[in-house]
Each structure stands twice: as structure tokens, then as C-alpha cells.
Image: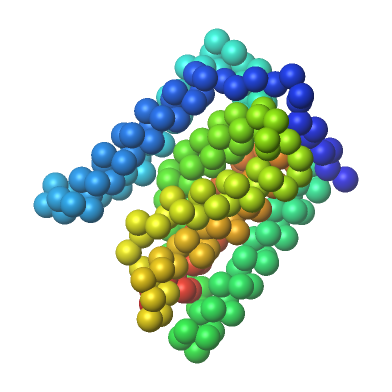
Amino acid sequence: MGEVVEQDANATMDFEDIRAGVVVGIVFAVVKTLKVGVPSLGVGMADSVIPAAMTLGYILLRARREPEKLDAWGITTPISWAAWGASAGLVLAGAAVLAAASRALSGEITFRAWYLFDMIAYVAAAFPQQFFLCSVGLASLSTLRIFRGRWRLPLFVGLVFGLAHFWTPVHLPNSSFPIQVVATMPMGFFASYYFLRFRSIVPLTLWHTVLYVLMVNWVQRFL
């Protein structure tokens, strides 16, 4: 069984991590705004590549000074069989829901080889999200007394993660409600719960990439 990582009652917020997250978030918002608002600039994948490069640069620089942060962030934390099993279960459950939705919307369920390449490409976007959501955001919020306990923090993060996708343009049928909000709320909840239990973002990043690409190709493109 996987070891449950208990919350440290003496843990404090790492404000250097928080500042890095704010800076990367601002840069992402600016680049994304330019991509959506001024298509002629040809921003392309810069809204994924630039935040990913900034995140990786921060991790490398900080880890040179404080190597123990790699474990604290959940990057080099040993991954137990239970952690891999829980991750696989989440992927299969999420894929089953998306497959059912695809069947209902299009009458078929397809899997193309190029989905795999899209998943690999999406790692650049998924990793910074998981790093700042879990390694920084969850680790920081878990130090607050109001979020002590098993369910409060995952519920809060799920809500925030979903609302953060409210800008996405594809909506539920006959509705102005974005489809990604529906998908990302439970994803944020389960990702939070998983990280607080196993303290590893590697499996989280992998299932984030898999489920996002399946959601786009099995559900979003039919709406």
C-alpha cells in the first residue's frame, strides 16, 4: 500500500514559490490574451512553451540551492504501486465517462494514433499547471488551519480550478456554460486529493495530459 503523507502542522508557506507562481501566471495571462485577442501575431504554442520554460527554469535554479525541494514539490518523491494504481484508476474512470459522452454525442468512440502525439505535446502545458496547483498551491494552502482535514482543500481547489476555465469558448449544448468547467472541477478535486495523499505530481501530469486530449477529441469537438 502507498504511504499516506500526513499534513505537517508546523509547515509554513513558501513565499518564494508563491511569487514564482504569480509571475508565471501573469506571463501566461498576457500571452494567452495576445493569442486570443490578436491572432495575427501568430503566438502559436507560446502560451504553453513560455510558462513551461519559466517553470522548469525556476525548479532548476531553486533545486540547486535547496535540493530537498524536489521531494517537497513531489517531483522526485518515490512513487508507490498504490500511487500508480490510484492514478490508473482515475485515468480509466475519467476515460470511461468521456467515452460514454462521446458515444452519446457522436454515436462512436475512436482513438487515433495522433492522440498520443497530442498528449506528449500537451505535457508542456500540463506540467506547470500541476506544479503550481499542487506543489505550490496545495502545499501552501494546506498550512492554513481552515483547510486542515481530508476534504476541505480538495473541494476548494476543485471549485477554483473549474472556475479558472470559465473563459474557454466551447459550451454545453443550448447553454452558455463552458464544458471545461464541468470537466475540470472534478479533475481539480481528485488531483488535489491524490497529491495530498501521495505527494507526487508525475502521475498527475500524465493523467492530466491523457484526459485533456480525450476530452477535446471525444467531447469538446462535437459541441
User: Would residue 141 be visible to someone looking at this image?
Assistant: yes
In the image, farthest residue toward the bottom: 107
Viewport quadrant of the C terminus: bottom left
Left or right: where 157 falls relative to 82: left
x%, y% of residue 89? 72, 60
How many marks are shown on the rendered structure?
Answer: 0
Left or right: where 7 falls relative to 15: right
Residue found at x 15% / y 50%: 38
User: Would residue 131 be visible to someone looking at this image?
Assistant: no
Left or right: where 110 falls relative to 79: left
In the image, farthest residue toward the top: 65
Residue found at x 65% / y 47%: 154
140 is higher (above) or lower (below) than 95: above
x%, y% of residue 184? 52, 58
In the image, farthest residue toward the front: 146
Left or right: where 131 falls relative to 75: left
Residue found at x 56% / y 31%: 136
In the image, farthest residue toward the right: 1
Quadrant in the rendering for residue 19: top left
138 is higher (above) or lower (below) than 111: above
x%, y% of residue 135? 59, 33
- Out of 125 and 134, give the one closest to the viewer: 134
Here the colouring is: rainbow
Quadrant in the rendering for residue 216: bottom left
Viewport quadrant of the N terminus: top right
- Out of 219 and 10, give the one closest to the viewer: 10
x%, y% of residue 156? 60, 47
